[in-house]
Amino acid sequence: MRLLLLLPLMIFAGCPDPSAPADDPTADPGMGGGGGAGGGEPGGAGGGAGGAPMTPPAIGSAKFDVKPGEGVKLSGTISYSGSKTGPIHIDFLSPGENGSFPGLLASMTIEKAGPWETEAPKGLGKVGVVGYVDVAGDGPNDGDPAARISGLVEVGSDAIAGLDLALSDTPDLGEFTPGKGDKGPPPGSPPADGAAAGAAPATDGAAPAGAPPAGGTPPADGTAPAGSAPPAAGAAPAAAAGAPAPAK
């Protein structure tokens, strides 16, 4: 009798719960589940630090960091009457002071010659302004038509207009010349003092080490060199090298 009473309970306990979810591969795993955005293949390109390498900024894309209401307007024109073509860039450069080279603060690109304007931070200070035609599309080079604003522009709190650049095929950019200061003398150029490379300078009129004495090298047989003074009267002539001594 007791066994018959327990049998329905055992059957009820063995039935599955209809409310429990079945294993569905398309179900949302929720927090801590696999297969989400962070569960990529090992070694695969993911986002953030593990993604593709960052691309360097394009030439002419460096901009001033100007907060709203804290900028000052710079404006002018750029002109070119030559035949070379390419993007036109205007670079704003920090002056090279205390032996340092000029550095790029910002740059802008314009579609064609004509008026230009930009905004710089107030109180920026002294800035060099250079415009050029980027013929090869690789930044400033010696062969690019270019021009600079004479001297340095003092950027304070007031707008500055009239920054006009007339590009030339033979520009004089001064300290802003591309590559200026990073090239040594041409190969094979003599030293500035004209001395041969590696030669030690003579001191106090003495001949350098290894040089023959004045008047040339003396003969090997011990005879006096041509033009030397004759021996004194009564003096015995010098014995030839290797001759036997006279008998006493």
Image (tube, rainbow, N blue to C red):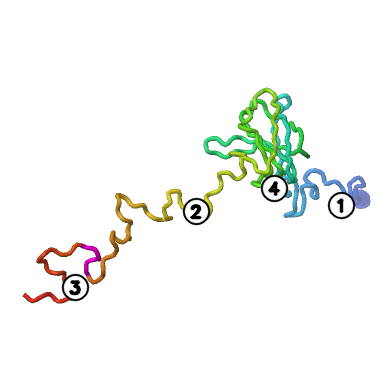
- First reached walking from the N terminus: tag 3 or tag 4: 4
Three-letter code for the amino acid on which mark 1 is drawn: Pro
Three-letter code for the amino acid on which mark 2 is drawn: Ser
The residue that disc 3 covers is 240
The residue that disc 2 covers is 189
Question: Is 235 placed above or below 242 here?
Answer: above
Between the C-alphas of marks 2 and 3, the distance is: 50 Å
- First reached walking from the N terminus: tag 1 or tag 3: 1
Q: Position of residue 57 (x, y in %)?
A: 71, 43
Q: Position of residue 234 (x, y in %)?
A: 9, 66
The residue that disc 4 covers is 138
Q: Is residue 17 magenta?
A: no
Between the C-alphas of marks 1 and 3, the distance is: 116 Å
Three-letter code for the amino acid on which mark 3 is drawn: Ala
Between the C-alphas of marks 4 and 1, the distance is: 52 Å
Q: Report the side of 198 relative to 73 (left or right).
A: left
Name the image quarter holding residue 144.
top right
Q: Where residue 50 is drawn, which disc sits there?
A: none
Q: Report the side of 231 relative to 103 (left or right).
A: left
Q: Where residue 25 is drawn, which disc sits there?
A: 1
Between the C-alphas of marks 4 and 2, the distance is: 30 Å
Circle 4 — which element? loop
Three-letter code for the amino acid on which mark 4 is drawn: Asp
Between the C-alphas of marks 3 and 4, the distance is: 79 Å
Contact check, label 2 and label 3, Cβ < 8 Å: no
Dot 4 surroundings within 10 Å: few (below 14), some, or many (20 or more)? few
Contact check, label 3 and label 4, Cβ < 8 Å: no
Magenta residue span: 222-228
Which residue lies at the image location 77% right of the left edge and 51% below the top edge?
Answer: 40
Q: Position of residue 230 (x, y in %)?
A: 17, 64
